[in-house]
Amino acid sequence: MLAFGTPSVSISRGRTRGLLWAGIIAPILFAATFMIDGFLKPGYSVDNEAISYLEVGAYGWVQQANFIIFGLLLVVFLVGYMRVMRPILGQGWLYAASVFLILSDIGWIMSGLFIPNTFLGPQFTWPAIMHQIAFDMVFLPLTIGWLILGIKCLFTRGWRGYGIYSLIIGIPLCAFTSIAVINLLDPAAVAGIIGNQNAPHDGIINRVMLLIAPLAWYIISAAIGLRLAKRQPETSTAQPISERA
């Protein structure tokens, strides 16, 4: 009796790596889009205006789509990140961090759905207020997620460096995010510090903050995840075997 069949096909590792690649593609695509759009958009000041104001006026749909696609790709990345980090963090710590990370991803999507008013204009219409809420929803949960990951990794053998890195970017951003929340509740309390104002080089600061904090963290975390996925055992599916006498 002869048995005929096909070799087992690996599925899990390839899918996980594909999910993790979204964490590298998303920040690069997001940054390239808002950089190019900022220089090409008529009447827009890269030096003074935050990237959210790219959503206003001509070709505003470009940045709106950029926010939404970025958020969706980060959701894809998070699925792969949870897979590879579960053995490192444990289920409880991983789920706690992931809840806040997914809230941040939703905040990016909301940023593209709700458009602010013009630069230096009043931000009291409901879409503009929702955009401010989306801003806080991006950074406050993200900061908490980083702190959770940082504390856990700090006391996990072999992961102290990643833990320190997450804390280094999470703690300062926590202070900034707290001010942003106060600005939403009582703008007068933080006037001159944050808000819709003509601050020198505010647009540049906005871009630098994005590049060195969330965008860099996602790329580094995705790269670490890809390395872990390569080391972890494959999950295979056995193909049906046909027999004949």
Image (cartoon, rainbow, N blue to C red):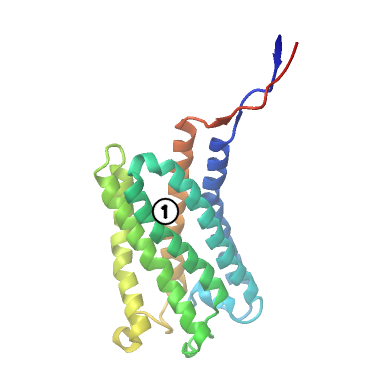
Residue furthest to the top: 1
Q: Position of residue 65 (x, y in %)?
A: 61, 68
What residue sits 57% from the left and 66% below the top?
Answer: 68
Residue furthest to the right: 245
Rendered position, 227 above or below 2: below
Drawn side of residue 152 relative to residue 65, left or right? left
Quadrant (top left/top right/bottom left/bottom right) for the C terminus: top right
Rendered position, 120 above or below 201: below
Drawn side of residue 117 relative to residue 96, left or right? right
Q: Position of residue 36 (x, y in %)?
A: 60, 65
Q: Position of residue 193 (x, y in %)?
A: 33, 80
Drawn side of residue 87 relative to residue 65, left or right? left
Is residue 41 something one can see in this rendering?
no
The picture quadrant where one finds residue 118 is bottom right
What residue sits 59% from the left and 62% below the top?
Answer: 69
Q: Position of residue 208 (x, y in %)?
A: 43, 64
Residue furthest to the left: 155
Callout 1 secondary element = helix
Quadrant (top left/top right/bottom left/bottom right) for the N terminus: top right
The picture quadrant where one finds residue 142 is bottom left
What residue sits 56% from the left and 30% below the top?
Answer: 236
Rendered position, 1 above or below 32: above
**Residue with the mark numbered 1:** 217
Rendered position, 10 above or below 181: above
**Which kind of residue does numbered mark 1 sit on?**
Trp
Is residue 86 something one can see in this rendering?
yes
What residue sits 34% from the left and 71% below the top?
Answer: 177
The picture quadrant where one finds residue 56 is bottom right
Mark count: 1
Query: Callout 1: few (<14), some (14-19), or many (20+) C-alpha neighbours within 10 Å?
Result: many
